[in-house]
Amino acid sequence: MKVPCVVAAVLMVAGSGLQAQDLPSPVCPGQSLQERVAQDACQQAYDVYQLLAPQLGLALTGGNATAGQGGVLGGIGHFSVGVRGNVFSGLLPDVTNFQQSLNGASRATLPTTKQIVGLPTADAAIGLFRGLPLGVTNILGLDALFSASYVPKINENSVTVDPRTSFQFGYGARVGLLSESIVTPGVSFSWIERDLPTTDVTGTASNATLSVSGAKVKTNAWRIVASKSLIVFGVAVGGGRDHYDQSATVAGVISGLGGAATTLATSQTLDRTNIFADLSWNLPLFKIVGEVGQASGGTVQTYNSFAGGRADRSQVYGSIGIRLSK
């Protein structure tokens, strides 16, 4: 699967959709004649954006802050760099088959297509402090964490994705609770913030244009992780909490009616519980790491429903990556 298709799916994905309508009334304005004509299109754009949060946030955060790593690196002179992709089964809204009412918002089940979605990310860690000796281990070591995400410009299948800049960087820290030794696992607490570039997304429906402009997606996550190297293989397990914070301006524009349009500034925050397990294959120069996890919790509300289930349902994900460390 091409990376642009994957990122387009992530940026315009309808999440997993809702089986029931949660919002009692539309949030897009519909007082004037022009607003009422375009209210349904605006509401559809709003719902697509609201449904974006769980999957887009998960594509950024994944599970472990450093794939396959539990404890700190061991102080000055130690580092880790890696690349990976977080993927999961999502739903892409079939925008070309959306239908709009010209007499105000009208509830509907909007069509979707199943899609494997994800986002490539890079991460790095630098050892700052080995920690304080405590028997056969050390405590309170410290690493600095960094990340980078990439969103290309896309124009295909009636969807355009136009990031203001293609790269966005993140940062964080990891504190060692135990350093790995021959008898103890590595255990740590980490916090990291990962964001996406400010992005404009436009989808063309049968007689309308749905747009999400100035979309800002910020995430932060904390993790507690334990790991142990078993010579050829290594294992890590952990969990924590994800926080997604997003804002954008959504709009619906109806074609052929003098450009009737309705716009709305919106935002969303969502908190989810995240648990995961890593398995790494320790090669001489680098590690190949696979991860499976699950994100759950939080509530997402929309006026329309989407075929396929709720956006805030429990979501299983996986990732594969390569990590070089010293």
Image: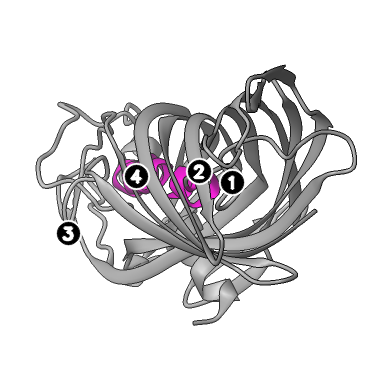
Please give the label number shown on residue 308.
Answer: 3
For the stretch drawn in magenta, what is the main secondary structure? helix
Label drawn at residue 51: 4
Q: Is residue 235 above or below residue 132?
A: below
Mark 1 vs mark 4, CA separation in Å: 32 Å
- Single out the residue that lies furthest toward the right: 77
Pair 2/3: label in front: 2
In 3D space, how far apart are the residues under numbered discs 3 and 4 (Cα atoms)? 12 Å
Q: Amino acid at mark 3?
A: Gly
What residue is pinned by disc 2?
227
Residue closest to the far bottom: 1
- The residue that appears at 38% across and 27% down in the rendered structure is 271
Question: Quick one: label 3 or label 4, which is nearer the N terminus?
Answer: 4
Q: Tell me, yes or no, whether the two marked residues, 1 and 2, touch with CB atoms within 8 Å.
A: yes
Of all residues, the one furthest to the left in this rendering is 20
Query: Mark 1: which secondary structure?
Result: loop
Crowdedness of circle 3 by 10 Å Cα count: few (<14), some, many (20+)? many
